Image (cartoon, grey):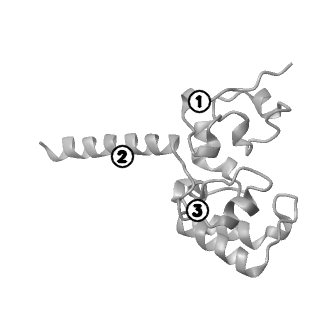
């Protein structure tokens, strides 16, 4: 096999792997109990791979003003969660934009959701692009497969 053919085959395999991974983003098995209790108390505890390590550090440094809420934690719990999030963070294509960084502004998220009608984001059942469970019926299990998506129907 020529070097060019080998390179094309490798690129195709990588693309398929990334596409398959985007459908499955489970929370890592070593998640501390505080992850679901603290992060899941207000929203879906997002898979750490959805932001980069520097982004997670910025999120955790600003918990007193966490997207408009005070999500402050004691030092031990904050460190435990930050260590977990950083250890399982995503690569550079998951870099969030904004301050604090938003997973809904990553290159990956914007590409995956580019066909979602603007009205869907404003739907009362959705409320926010960060409300994954509004459309992804198995998001809590880490599954984001296209066939499991149910867009809410507005009245």
Q: Name the residue under label 1.
A: 148
Residue 52: image tag: 3
Q: Name the residue under label 2.
A: 14
Quadrant of the snapshot with the N terminus? top left
- Inspect this view and state whether residue 100 appears: no
Q: Residue at the spot x=62%, y=67% of the render? A: 32
Q: Position of residue 118 (x, y in %)?
A: 76, 30
- Inspect this view and state whether residue 79 appears: yes
First-in-chain label (3 vs 2):
2
Callout 1 secondary element: helix
Furthest toward the left, the residue is 1
Q: How far apart are marks 3 and 2 (CA)?
A: 20 Å
Q: Please state which of the two labelled residues, at mark 1 or mark 2, is closer to the viewer.
A: 1
Q: Is residue 133 left or right of residue 146?
A: right
Q: Residue at the spot x=27%, y=41% of the render? A: 8
Q: Residue at the spot x=55%, y=30% of the render? A: 146
């Amino acid at each position: 096999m020529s070097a060019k053919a080998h390179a094309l085959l490798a690129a195709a395999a990588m693309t398929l792997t990334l596409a398959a991974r985007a459908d499955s983003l489970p929370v890592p098995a070593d998640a501390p109990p505080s992850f679901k209790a603290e992060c899941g108390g207000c929203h879906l505890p997002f898979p750490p791979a959805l932001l980069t390590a520097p982004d997670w550090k910025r999120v955790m440094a600003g918990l007193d003003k966490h997207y408009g809420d005070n999500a402050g934690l004691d030092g031990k719990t904050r460190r435990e969660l930050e260590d977990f999030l950083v250890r399982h963070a995503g690569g550079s294509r998951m870099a969030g934009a904004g301050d604090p960084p938003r997973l809904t502004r990553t290159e990956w998220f914007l590409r995956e959701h580019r066909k979602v009608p603007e009205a869907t984001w404003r739907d009362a059942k959705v409320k926010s692009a960060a409300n994954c469970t509004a459309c992804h019926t198995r998001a809590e299990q880490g599954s984001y497969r296209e066939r499991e998506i149910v867009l809410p129907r507005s009245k």
